Each structure stands twice: as structure tokens, then as C-alpha cells.
Image (cartoon, rainbow, N blue to C red):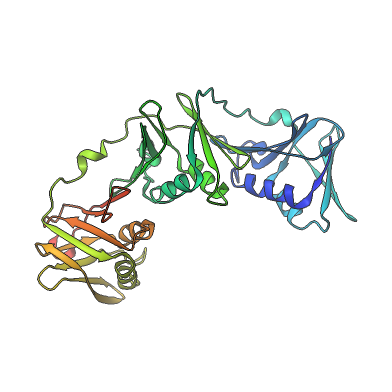
Amino acid sequence: MKIICDTSAINEVCSNLQRAVSPKSVNPALEGIYIKSTQRGIEFCGYDGEVGVTTVMSAESSSEGGVVINAKKLCDILRNLPEDKMSLEVDDKNKCVIRSGKRNHNIMGIKEDNYPELPYVMGGEPIVLPQKIIKDMIRQVIFAVSLDESKTVHKGVKFELKEGEITLAALDGYRLAVRHEYIDYKGANISFIVPPKALGEVVKLINNDEGFVSINLDKNKIVFTLNGYNIISGLFEGDFIDYKRTIPQTFTTEILVDTQVMNDSIEGTSILITEKFRTPIKCEIDAENNEIRFYSVTAEGDSTDEISAEITGKSTVKGFNSRYFIEALRAVETDRVLIKMNPSPVDPACIFPIEGDSFFYMILPVRLPDEQ
């Protein structure tokens, strides 16, 4: 096999595929990028046994064939080639010669027969969504997926589609993140749970706000198609918690606050909170004076801050994991948010938009030291 192509084009393709490759595997082929010359063009694939990314690139090719090349070595070589054009030549013993200008690299490839076959999705009518919508929705919930290996189903993001609507939800037992949009969808009511790595690849491959993402799925697999790439993944199977039943229906305290002001205050007050000194941040909601006071105390010292807010209802005091609050507020794209809560030390804080229902975040409180 011999191919000649644009250096920057193949470098971009391989850099995108390298993220999907397993950095260390018992099968060395999974540490590589599969390159195959076909009548369609040059096919590329990166796969870690769970998530695969494929694409096809135009190039000059004198013969068909395929090889697997270690992804890190290949990408390091391509990034430093001196000329705009490069060639890759592979012999029948999988010896690979990469040339650009006067520079030559000789490396051993892996026989293509050692590369595992990717799952194939036998999907029907695709679900088509604007790239900006799917990118924003994923980014605004993915941080809340569970890291608990014993609850695999909650390690993914739940997609729910019904006529005219899409909802994404993620939770980890301590917080819940939900995004909702109205879309042009007229299909059946469906739901499925997607691993976060696949969604991370989707977000990284969206390089502008134009265009669409096409989604095909069957019983246990899904493929996202966008910008010339396919991201193939298995789906998580199991019963996702009925999170809607966990949301309080009534509240005694409502807080209208500037999103950035509150985020900055919590960040600033949490500087002394580290992995070594993990303590909750104390939030005093003062309805009478329309103020929120934040306190953090660790073995290294303490921090305090105070911000103004429009508060109705009862005053209350709660403790929270500051990181959970910060990640939720960073995901919000509105200037102000509405936070609702009840006085019980075990009731959550719920973050809503002032208008509409585009997002919802719920954060469980942490008992403060004087409550234990």
C-alpha cells in the first residue's frame, strides 16, 4: 500500500483519532490507528474496545491494503514533518516508510488482521440535531455522571426524546444535572444511556456551531455522525433512576441571584478547600437582609464572603460541596438563576432558569460540623 496526501490533513485526522485509541492495552493493535486504502479513499479508525472513531480522507493511492500504526508514534511523526505533502508506503511485512521532503521514518506496523472489528449499527431513520444544541447540552450535564463502578448505568448520560423535545440527564447520587430543549423531532418516544467517553468525542469533533449531528441507534449500540466522522459506542443497559421523583415539589426559600457573582464568591471562599482538606462550604441565606454569606474552615485557615440577592421566604443555613455548586453555575449560560430550597438539612438546593425549563440542577447538602 502506498498513499500520498496533504500533511496537515492527515495530521488533523490522526490527532482526532488518537483520543479514541487505548493508551495501554493487552492488544497492541488497540494502541494504534488503523489505516486502510480503499476505493472510497483512505479509511482511518481509532478504537479502544468500547468507543471507536472512523473517517475517510481523499488521497492518492497506488494500491489497496491496510496497516495498524502505533498512534502516539504516528502522531508525533506527522506533527513534525517538514513539507506540505507526505507519503506512507507499507510492504507485505508491515514495514512502514513515512516520507516528507528529505525526511524518512521507518517504523514497524501491525498486521491489519489483528485489529478488532467495530460494532455495526443497524439503525433506521436517523435522529438529526443541530451541532450547537447537542454540544451545549452534553457539556452542561456530563460533569455530573457517576464515577461509581458498581452503578454502571449512572456512569452515562440519559437521552430522552419525545415529539418536539429532547432531555439529557446525569446524576451521581449527590447531584443531578438536566438539560431540555424543544426540537424538530416527530419520532417515537425513546430513551437510551450513552457512555461519557463517546459524548466527549462528539463535543471535541464539533468545531463550529453550524451543521448537524446525525444519530443512529439499535438495541445496544449508537453511532454519531458529524463533520465527516463516525463515533461508534455501546450503550449502557439497565434502569436509570426515576430522577423526576426525587425533585421537591414545594419550596420555602427562593433566591434570585447573579450567576457570575455567586460563582465567584463560592470559588473565592473555597480556595482553602482541597483534596487534603475537604470540608463543606457553609451558606447562610439571610432573607431579612437579602444577603448570602459563605464560610469555609479548614486546618489551614478560613475564608468568608457576602453577596446580595433577592430572597423571598425563610432564612436557612446549609452546607454544600463547593465544587458541585461551582460546576453547576459554570454550566449555566444565563446572567441570573433562581435557586430554591427548604430549611431541612437534608433537602437539596435546586437551580432553575428564571424563565422556561432549559436546565435544572439539584445539589444535595452536606452536614456541617456543628450538625454532626
Q: Would you identify the image quadrant in which residue 55 lies?
A: top right
Above or below for 327 versus 71: below
Expressed as whole percent of the image width and height from the top left, the position of residue 70 reads 71, 44
* Quadrant containing the N terminus in the rendered view: top right
Q: Would residue 349 appear left or right of 238 to someone viewing this image?
A: left
- Write the residue at 39% across / 46% down: 147
Q: Would residue 126 appear left or right of 4 to someone viewing this image?
A: left
Q: Nearer the viewer, residue 94 or 100?
A: 100
Q: Nearer the viewer, residue 183 or 299?
A: 183
Above or below for 195 versus 99: above
Above or below for 35 versus 259: above
Expressed as whole percent of the image width and height from the top left, the position of residue 248 reads 17, 46
- Write the residue at 66% across / 50% down: 15
Expressed as whole percent of the image width and height from the top left, the position of residue 343 reads 11, 57
Residue lying at the far right of the rendered structure:
102
Q: Would residue 38 appear left or right of 18 to someone viewing this image?
A: right
Q: Would residue 322 appear left or right of 31 to someone viewing this image?
A: left
Above or below for 308 versus 234: below
Q: Would you identify the image quadrant in which residue 235 lies?
A: top left
- Write the residue at 38% across / 46% down: 145
Task: State how many labels appear.
Answer: 0
* Quadrant containing the C terminus in the rendered view: bottom left
